[in-house]
Image (spheres, rainbow, N blue to C red):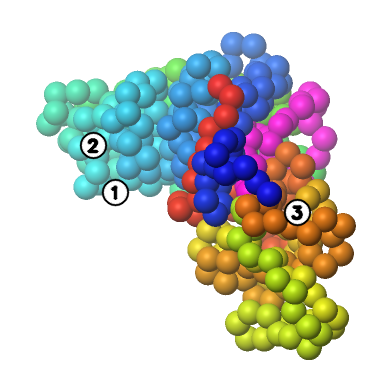
Amino acid sequence: MTDYSTGTDSIFDRSCVEIDLDALKHNFEQIKKATTPGTDIMAVVKADAYGHGALETAKTLIDSGAAGLCLATIDEAVELRKHGIDVPMMTLGYTDPSRFADAVRYDVEQAVYSFEIARTLSDEAVRKGKTLKIHVKLDTGMGRIGFKTDGSETDEIVKACRLPGLEPYGVFSHFAVADTDDDEYTERQFGLFMDQIDALEKSGIHFTKRHICNSAGILRFPGMHLDMVRAGIILYGLMPPGCPKPVVDVDLKPVMNWYAKVIHVKTVPAGSTISYGRHFTAGRPTEVTTVGIGYADGLSRRLSNGFELIIGGKKCPIIGNICMDMCMVDTTDLETRPQIGDKVTVFGSTRSADELADALGTINYEITCDVGKRVRRLYIGG
């Protein structure tokens, strides 16, 4: 029986994720080893640091040497500013013009990919009597946002960069397939990126930071590191799915371990059905162990009837449909009967989040991001 008075088990009642800050530091050092000397490493902590908790991870990464932070939304940046994080921050995508006042007030560098955005941002900066750094976004082949790189929008970029209240500090793009073996497309993107920068420099626009490498780009294309790289999924100990072998070997450690607890154990006779819809029928007397985790915690209902959770070091299949707050597993074949309070492993250092991703036909990014807000984050190490 678990001792409820001490240890990690006493800190969470149903489910938690352990975030290993020492593993996070280790991963940053590995990334630093793989990055060209003199190149800044920006830490991507958008989406609550891919589900790991932005504030604690940001503090650890800054202490480890990150040059700044990349966010998706202005709210993510403002929240960190309010907690005393004063390093450079930039948003990688869209900010609604109604939030430009916050961008200027909290000094959050903005992605600019149209003249209209630049002009509205300029008006706000001038109104506040400040100068805001911007990063010009170029679309080299992702097809999301960005100025065209066929030369047709060079004059528009120049006009945007010359607006008052704006400092054209950075220029960036994003690789579409750096994590595949389609190196020809990645090289084409890099070529378009550099050609557009050359055209802008000939027009008198010079940037302090040029950056295009994401996690896969860092590991596979050291010649493209330029002034700055943006480390994302590899910070958290996971490789971009399907990524070919890196140029530099890196030893990454998973940062997140997701656990739940056994909350009930019983044996049902053959012929019994389990959970909503009665999609599982016991073919033998079955020990049913109920676990305090469900789809509202981020354990996808699509993992029902077959995916395995780990109890006592052994994989035990989920039986029946996963419920909102609970799921049931078959522990009949375990040598030791589970006890209420026993720890259940979903994924972590002993079982990769990639296994869940493969079972769901998705990527590991989505798995960590989907861990619910009500699942307590417990920070160890650091």
* Residue type indicated by callout 3: Ile
* Residue type indicated by callout 1: Asp
Q: Which residue is mark 2?
A: 102
Residue 125 in view in this figure: yes
* Residue type indicated by callout 2: Asp
Quadrant showing the C terminus: top right
**Circle nearer the N terminus (3, 2):** 2
For this rendering, which residue is in front, 55 or 235?
A: 55
Say what secondary structure mark 3 lies in. strand
Distance (Cα) linking label 3 and label 1: 46 Å
Determine whether, in the image, residue 206 is placed left or right of residue 360: left
Q: Residues within 10 Å of mark 3 (few under 14, many from 20)?
A: many
Q: Main secondary structure of the magenta part?
A: loop
Q: Residue furthest bottom?
A: 271
Distance (Cα) linking label 2 and label 1: 11 Å
For this rendering, which residue is in front, 312 or 242?
A: 312
What number is the disc on residue 311? 3
